[in-house]
Structure formats: C-alpha cells, structure tokens
Image (cartoon, rainbow, N blue to C red):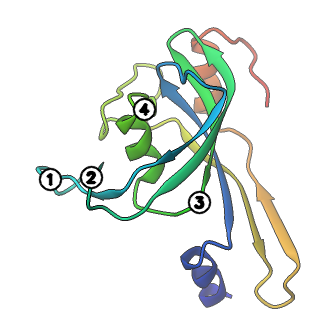
Amino acid sequence: AHLSLAAQLADHSMHREYRMIVCGNLKEDSGTVDAPIGRHPVDRKRMAVVKDGRHAVTHWKVLERYPGFTYAEAVLETGRTHQIRVQFAGVGCPVTGDTLYGAESPHIVRHALHSWKTEFPHPMTGERITVTAPVPEDMRSLMNALGFPDFEE
C-alpha cells in the first residue's frame, strides 16, 4: 500500500486540496500560479521561484475575502517542496504565519495552510477514496480574529 501511495504522489494521480489564509488580497476570484521552484539562490534552506527551477503549477480559488487577507483553496497539479508557500509568497500574497517566507502573524504560531482533502485510488481495488479533515481550530480562531466571528466551514 505504501509503495502504491508513493507512486501516486510521484505520478500526480493523487488529488490534494488545501485551505489557506494569505496576506493581501488575491485580485481575481480564481487562477493558476505556474512558476518554477528551486533552491533559493542565497539561503539554501529555503525554496524560491527561480527561472531554472522545476515545473510547478497550483490552481486556486477565493473562498472568502477579509480586509488585508484572503481565505482560499489551492489544488496542486505538481508537488514541489513548499510549493504553495513559495508560489504565493512569489505573487505577493504569502501564507499568513509563514515565518520562513515572510508573513509572521500575532494570531497564529504556524503557517495558515491546511490539507483538507485528499483523493486517491485504493491501492488494491482501485476504488476512489476521499479523506477530508476540517479546518483546524487555530485557523478558525485566526478567521475570527480577522473579523469573521463564528467561522464554520
């Protein structure tokens, strides 16, 4: 089962959806970030959008807008290290609370990015499996702090 799931990650047949709160306002209601990712040219611990990086594509749509923040969903077409965090920092809307890519927040102690839905074929039967997880309490608290009291998914 492990080998099958690892192969699905490698060949991109596993579907993954994320929820995130980014700093700033995404101007469109949906879009695609198609920007190559590689090692940061100066800080080797970080990744960055770089001309000669590996192909990376993320599709996104806005779920809610807050003053100065956007709650959005991201769907990976590829899967690169820190892909969502790097690409959204690269377009000027870093993930809230992401100290590595420049968006500290007094309201959350980690980056506000959550893998909420994964779909994949069962390794033995091929039946489509869907696994979901609700938005964590710290992200719901952040949404409430941003002005949406009693946020519920």
Q: Which residue is mark 1?
A: 41
Q: Earlier in the sequence, mark 4 or mark 2?
A: 2
Question: For mark 3, what is the residue?
Answer: 77
Mark 4 vs 3: CB contact within 8 A: no
Can you say whether 55 is above or below 133 in the image? below
Q: Nearer the viewer, mark 1 or mark 4?
A: 1
Looking at the rendered image, the disc whose residue lies closer to the viewer, 4 or 2, is: 2
Q: CA distance from mark 4 to mark 3?
A: 28 Å
**Label 4 SS:** loop
Amino acid on which disc 2 is placed: Val
The 10 Å Cα crowd at callout 1, few under 14, some 14 to 19, many 20 or more, is: few
Q: Which corner quadrant holds the N terminus?
A: bottom right
Please give the residue where the numbered disc 2 appears in the rendered image.
50
Real-space Cα separation, disc 3 to disc 2, in angstroms: 18 Å
Position of residue 85 relative to residue 61, above or below, is: below
Visible in this render: residue 98? no
Q: Which residue is mark 4?
A: 109
- Quadrant of the image occupied by residue 38: bottom left
**Secondary structure beneath disc 2?**
loop
| Three-letter code for the amino acid on which mark 3 is drawn | Glu
Query: Crowding near pointer 4: few (<14 within 10 Å), some, many (20+)?
Result: few
Please give left or right for residue 101 compared with residue 1 in the image.
left
Sequence-wise first label, 3 or 1: 1
Look at the numbered discs 2 and 1 and tell me whether their residues touch, using CB distance below 8 Å. Answer: yes
Q: Amino acid at mark 1?
A: Pro
Amino acid carrying label 4: it is Val
Q: Earlier in the sequence, mark 4 or mark 3?
A: 3
